[in-house]
Image (cartoon, grey):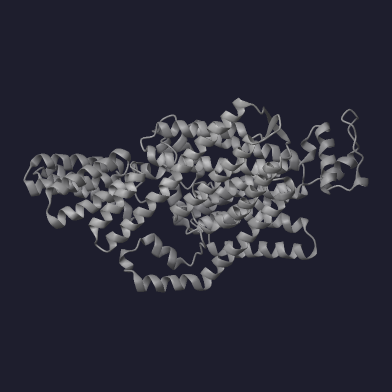
């Protein structure tokens, strides 16, 4: 028992440090630190399971929550979707991330006591203060310093237009790289700071109010319309819960608010007065493409994490390229099918259903209401003299008793956590918060803290015998295997980074050696095969070596096999075949080039440049009529993109 308590303390210490530092590293931009954080969670999960194996009691108790079943069903669908995916490497990578989030959830639920929840919330708020201060520094000084550095060290014409637009817009993003992600983070943290301010006294109340003001100030400079609308929704529902405290009234006024909000939003959209109108127009394009993708996707979806690879096939002319649907629910639907979406929604629905029962006592049965009063008295919400607790078999109390219950029995912290999750889901309607690992980790951590405050106090009671210990050991082996996958990603990415540095120095041979080492750890990574192809293509062209060129062709074919959806893979293979057709005067290579360009167009039909290149190739082989048709298509698509 002492050993288990010690391990529990170690886990909580790691979790404190983890939740403090996680927001400082954006998982989309820094893959190696992201994998390190995943390894930490896996290590803690193994430590926890090991403590269960070492348990000396006859019965092992594991926390049982109402979210376990939907989570397990969702994991099962993720596994099926990954197994049937055409981009299995990408799907497996995303699958491991989701497993990591759920491991974190179970770790927190089983190792954090209710009395420690407030401590974790303070850590979350302290981290948010640092993130916000850095964002404000960025607005007044940091962005200008970054502009000067880039102007000095880089050629502006070679930088991505999106990066230049971001730097010139004065929209802060702090450590999240993307302003809307910072806005989503603030939207999640703000309800927590407000409820902490309400329940605190004197000096601490002022501190938490100052934190809330700082978060709002930082949110303003993100200039995120989605973030501001999400915050407005949170405030409205907080006021409804805090003052009405009756489910019927909350549903009525909440429905009216949503209806009026949609009505005003549609009017603003039609009149063109909506801020950042062009970005919202892009989102409409993303959502339209998502629905087309869903129609043509198999029952289990295309696999988690594969949306970005497939998007170009369904992209509307004039819509910007993207890796995400900018709507978590549509992306989950496209990647895991209708069952995946339903189980994903089931997770959140179960939480809100339980939270509503806990937050609004008048929706309980009489027995549950009496228990709520008793618990609230223990928590300090209701003074002892304020209400007489009745036995479950006694008649329902007077109207004054019920009204007093509404006023006093109000678990504010759970309300704040619930609104934090609500803000995440609302913001997810227009962005991809679930697919940013740093944000996803925080929301599942908040979800676990909320479940702790639900006080379900249910357990899986398992006999502590040989079979149980063997099962736990097998689970540890499985989790260790997942950790080994993360470790291989770290080792591979380090070598890949060294390869990029050598390519910049024009040391192609050394770069090739480093990339081969990366492929040793991750032989099924299509992007590494594509990089190897680029290196060998440069070597072949510089040395005019046909053997190395053949090797490059094999490498790009391998990349296509591992991810057949990327148009520029097919386009680059077409260029090589075209080159060989000219170099070796072999017309069969021209046919191969035409075939690959058609594949590129099938993967990205609205890319006018590919149609133009196919026209050139048709002209090269003497098919002028087909060439003219392709030129006309290319010109039409280019005009649509410009307009």
Task: Identify which residue, 557 or 426, lies in the foreground.
Answer: 557
At which x and y percent is residue 96? 48, 41
Identify the residue shown where x is 23% and y is 40%.
598
Q: Residue at x 84, y 45 (%)?
A: 378
Question: Is 305 in front, or is 615?
Answer: 305
Residue 587: image x %, image y %? 8, 41
Q: Which residue is outermost to the left?
A: 585
Question: Quick one: 142 or 466, which is closer to the camera?
Answer: 466
Residue at (16% x, 45% y) in the render: 550
Number of numbered markers: 0
Image quarter for residue 392? top right
Quadrant of the drawing holding the C terminus = bottom left
> Residue 115 vs residue 150: left or right?
right
Residue 623, position as x, y percentages in the image: 11, 42
Q: Does the image show residue 321? A: no
Left or right: residue 58 versus residue 18 is right
Give percent across and percent down for residue 159: 34, 63
Q: In the picture shown, does residue 398 fall above or below 502?
A: above
- Residue 452 in view in this figure: yes
Front residue of 453/420: it is 453
The N terminus - image quarter: top right
In this picture, residue 555 sits left or right of residue 209: left
Describe residue 384's horizontal placement relative to residue 80 as left or right. right
| Residue at 70% across, 49% down | 117
């Amino acid at each position: 028992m002492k050993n288990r308590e010690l391990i529990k303390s170690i886990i909580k210490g790691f979790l404190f440090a983890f939740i403090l530092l996680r927001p400082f590293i954006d998982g989309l931009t820094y893959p190696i630190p992201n994998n390190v954080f995943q390894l930490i969670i896996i290590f803690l999960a193994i430590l926890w399971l090991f403590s269960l194996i070492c348990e000396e009691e006859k019965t092992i108790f594991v926390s049982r929550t109402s979210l376990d079943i939907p989570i397990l069903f969702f994991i099962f669908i993720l596994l099926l979707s990954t197994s049937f995916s055409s981009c299995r490497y990408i799907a497996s990578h995303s699958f491991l991330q989701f497993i990591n989030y759920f491991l974190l959830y179970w770790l927190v639920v089983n190792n954090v006591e209710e009395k420690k929840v407030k401590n974790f919330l303070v850590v979350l708020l302290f981290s948010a203060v640092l993130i916000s201060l850095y964002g404000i520094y960025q607005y007044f000084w940091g962005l200008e310093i970054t502009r000067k550095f880039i102007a000095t060290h880089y050629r502006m014409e070679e930088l991505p237009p999106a990066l230049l637009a971001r730097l010139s817009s004065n929209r802060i993003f702090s450590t999240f790289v993307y302003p809307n992600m910072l806005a989503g983070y603030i939207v999640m943290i703000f309800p927590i700071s407000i409820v902490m301010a309400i329940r605190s006294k004197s000096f601490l109340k002022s501190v938490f109010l100052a934190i809330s003001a700082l978060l709002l100030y930082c949110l303003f400079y993100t200039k995120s319309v989605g973030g501001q609308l999400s915050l407005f929704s949170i405030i409205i529902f907080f006021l409804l819960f805090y003052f009405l405290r009756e489910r019927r009234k909350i549903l009525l006024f909440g429905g009216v608010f949503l209806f009026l909000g949609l009505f005003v939003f549609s009017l603003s959209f039609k009149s063109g007065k909506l801020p950042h109108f062009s970005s919202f127009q892009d989102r409409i394009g993303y959502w339209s493409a998502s629905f087309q993708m869903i129609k043509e996707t198999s029952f289990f979806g295309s696999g988690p994490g594969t949306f970005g690879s497939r998007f170009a096939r369904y992209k509307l002319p004039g819509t910007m390229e993207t890796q995400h649907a900018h709507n978590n629910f549509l992306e989950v639907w496209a990647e895991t099918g209708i069952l995946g979406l339903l189980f994903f929604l089931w997770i959140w629905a179960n939480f809100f259903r339980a939270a509503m029962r806990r937050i609004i006592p008048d929706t309980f049965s009489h027995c549950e209401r009496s228990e709520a009063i008793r618990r609230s008295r223990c928590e300090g919400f209701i003074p002892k003299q304020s209400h007489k607790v009745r036995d479950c078999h006694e008649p329902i109390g007077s109207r004054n008793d019920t009204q007093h219950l509404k006023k006093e029995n109000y678990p504010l912290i759970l309300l704040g956590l619930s609104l934090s999750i609500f803000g995440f889901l609302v913001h997810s309607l227009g962005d991809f918060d679930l697919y940013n690992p740093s944000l996803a980790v925080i929301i599942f951590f908040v979800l676990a803290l909320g479940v702790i405050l639900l006080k379900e106090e249910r357990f899986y009671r398992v006999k502590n015998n040989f079979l149980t210990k063997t099962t736990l050991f097998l689970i540890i082996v499985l989790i260790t295997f997942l950790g080994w996958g993360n470790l291989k990603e770290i080792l591979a990415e380090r070598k890949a980074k060294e390869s990029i540095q050598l390519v910049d120095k024009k040391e192609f041979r050394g770069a090739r050696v480093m990339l081969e080492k990366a492929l040793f750890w991750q032989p099924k990574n299509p992007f590494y095969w594509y990089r190897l192809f680029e290196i060998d293509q440069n070597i072949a062209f510089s040395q005019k070596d046909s053997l190395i060129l053949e090797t490059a062709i094999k490498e790009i074919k391998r990349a296509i096999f591992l991810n057949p959806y990327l148009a520029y893979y097919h386009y680059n293979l077409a260029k090589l075949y075209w080159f060989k057709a000219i170099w070796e005067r072999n017309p069969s290579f021209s046919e191969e080039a035409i075939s690959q360009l058609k594949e590129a167009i099938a993967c990205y039909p609205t890319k006018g440049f590919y149609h133009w290149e196919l026209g050139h190739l048709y002209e090269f082989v003497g098919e002028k009529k087909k060439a003219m048709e392709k030129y006309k298509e290319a010109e039409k698509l280019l005009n649509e993109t410009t307009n």
